[in-house]
Image (spheres, grey):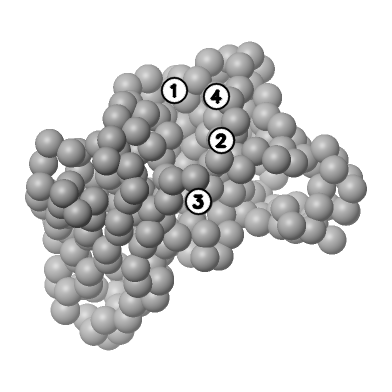
Amino acid sequence: GEQVEQLPSILRVQEGSSASINCTYENSASNYFPWYKQEPGENPKLIIDIRSNMERKQTQGLIVLLDKKAKRFSLHITDTQPGDSAMYFCAASKASGSWQLIFGSGTQLTVMP
Amino acid sequence: EAAVTQSPRSKVAVTGGKVTLSCHQTNNHDYMYWYRQDTGHGLRLIHYSYVADSTEKGDIPDGYKASRPSQENFSLILELASLSQTAVYFCASSGRESNTEVFFGKGTRLTVV
């Protein structure tokens, strides 16, 4: 079946530095790419998303880039803080207009003080 | 905030036994989903539903049944629980429009022994 590959699976950064997570998808018809943050014992929560009519989106220290040609999208967290430590999941819609999401395998981010 | 409530939050089941996981949403959402989370696999879709009294197979439906008796409620049923079904299960809901936020419950940790 369709897959979304997410790398790295583990990421450790120093407080104040940037963190980057990369995802690739298979279906060129995918048009919606959300990112979810999951803290220990909690439910995943949407932090930012991007649609295929955009190449870049930024909100509150988060930047998402989308390269449709390469079928690649990425999350960049600037000026990381200990509170950013969590599991992050990327996802891609199964097809254009589909309600179904395919999730990446997750990145465990640790921000070290 | 949109609310998705799962019960129980954790459960230990015996191999071969029947397990029912329940989910209730107060978001007035049409779509409901059951995901399974395993280390290294992210979130994988088991079953989903877009209307009461109807369910659809997701990416990994084998060994699971689903039931949507009303718009608010969506259950996941393991008729014959197996060791390989030990995982964390998340229920989620989303609105009628595609490419919108999916709201997750807090998860059910199921251990099959």
Circle 1: residue type: His
Label 1–label 3 contact, CB within 8 A: no
Alpha-carbon span between mark 1 and mark 3: 20 Å
Circle 3: residue type: Leu
Label 1–label 4 contact, CB within 8 A: no
The residue mark sitting in front, 2 or 1, is: 2
Q: Is disc 4 surrounded by few (<14), some (14 to 19) or many (20+) residues within 10 Å?
A: many
Alpha-carbon span between mark 4 and mark 3: 17 Å
Alpha-carbon span between mark 4 and mark 2: 10 Å
Alpha-carbon span between mark 2 and mark 3: 12 Å
Q: Output the chain of dot 4.
A: B
Q: Nearer the viewer, residue A3 or B101?
A: A3
Q: Is disc 1 surrounded by few (<14), some (14 to 19) or many (20+) residues within 10 Å?
A: many
SS for dot 2: loop
Q: Which residue is mark 2?
A: B58
- The answer to which image quadrant residue B94 occupies is top left
Q: Which label's residue is closer to the chain start, 2 or 3?
A: 3
Q: Which label's residue is closer to the chain start, 4 or 3?
A: 3
Q: Is disc 2 surrounded by few (<14), some (14 to 19) or many (20+) residues within 10 Å?
A: some
Residue at left offset 20%, top offset 43%? A50
Q: Output the chain of dot 3.
A: B
SS for dot 3: strand
Q: Nearer the viewer, residue A59 or B96?
A: B96
SS for dot 4: strand
The residue mark sitting in front, 4 or 2, is: 2
Mark identifier at residue B49: 4
Image quadrant holding the C terminus of chain A, namely: bottom left
Q: Do circles 1 and 3 both sit on a common chain?
A: yes
Residue at left offset 28%, top offset 35%? A29
The answer to whether residue B5 shows anywhere in this view is no
